[in-house]
Image (cartoon, helix red, strand yellow):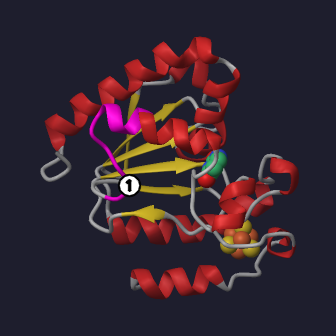
Amino acid sequence: MEMNFEALKSQVTACTACELCKTRHNVVFGDGVPNAEVMFIGEGPGEQEDLQGRPFVGRAGQLLDKMLAVIDLDRSKNIYITNMVKCRPPQNRDPLPAEQEQCIAYLRGQVAAIRPKIIVCLGRIAACRLISKDFKVTKQHGMWFEKNGVLMMGTFHPAALLRYPAQKPAAFEDFTALRDKIQEICDHTY
Ligand code: URA
Ligand code: SF4
């Protein structure tokens, strides 16, 4: 059954279904507009996100916001951003498969409510879980995959771009391809 978005948010905010609830400061549900045609999915909250309760607000998030602005996307106007897990993994370790399994029902609820036309996976964790289990970001970034009527693309995680700036031009090509696809299939993003 599809749940009202605010009810889902309240449920997630109180969730204690996995161990990550013990070390979190805030649950990071997501940020953006409810009628978004394009959804971005990261890995999990980092330190700043955990403290502020919003996704992608630290250094990687600032880079993401700048890259989004280049193609006229803005979380306050025309997209939605969330993560595979809603609570911060300690020391920013990868979320465990069991934690992702527990949390993915909430992501499914968000996708069911928002009904995006395009989903962009930011980094390996989201792409491997949502596109294909052996997804290789360096080889398959920017490619389109259709799943249940939704077009999906995996690209570099912005934290990876901070570590390896040589990958930035390739990431910008993915964003240009995304802009073109939005112009082709979306009707109220631009
Ligand atoms: N990295 C992520 O994957 N998600 C965030 O929200 C912040 C950093
Ligand atoms: Fe619940 Fe997800 Fe947080 Fe685990 S990470 S406690 S499943 S909201």
Query: Which residue position is annotated with label 1?
Result: 75
Q: Position of residue 64 (x, y in %)?
A: 50, 39
Q: Main secondary structure of the magenta part?
A: loop
Give the magenta part as a residue range.
67-76
At label 1, which amino acid type do we have? Arg
* Residue at disc 1, secondary structure: loop
Residue lying at 31% horizontally and 24% vertically, measured from the top left: 176
Return the x and y of residue 63 as percentages of the image width and height.
53, 35
In the rendered view, tell whether residue 153 sits above or below residue 176.
Answer: below
Question: With 79 as the anchor, is 154 left or right in this view?
Answer: right
Q: Is residue 156 left or right of residue 109?
A: right
Can residue 1 be seen in this snapshot? no
Location of residue 137 (image quadrant): top right
Image position, residue 124 (x, y; %): 64, 35
Q: Residue at x 45, y 42 (%)?
A: 65
Depth order, front residue of 14/54: 54
When the figure is inspected, residue 132 is found, relative to residue 98, above or below; the finding is: above
Say whether residue 73 is magenta. yes
Q: Quadrant of the C terminus?
A: top left
Q: Quadrant of the N terminus?
A: bottom left
Kindly indicate the quadrant of the structure image that contains residue 5. Answer: bottom left
Residue 60 visible in this rendered orientation of the protein? yes
Query: How far across and down, in percent of the image, does residue 94 sit?
Result: 79, 46
Please tell me which residue lies in front, 182 or 152: 182
Residue under the point 60% across and 30% down: 135
Is 34 drawn above or below residue 184 in the view shown?
Answer: below
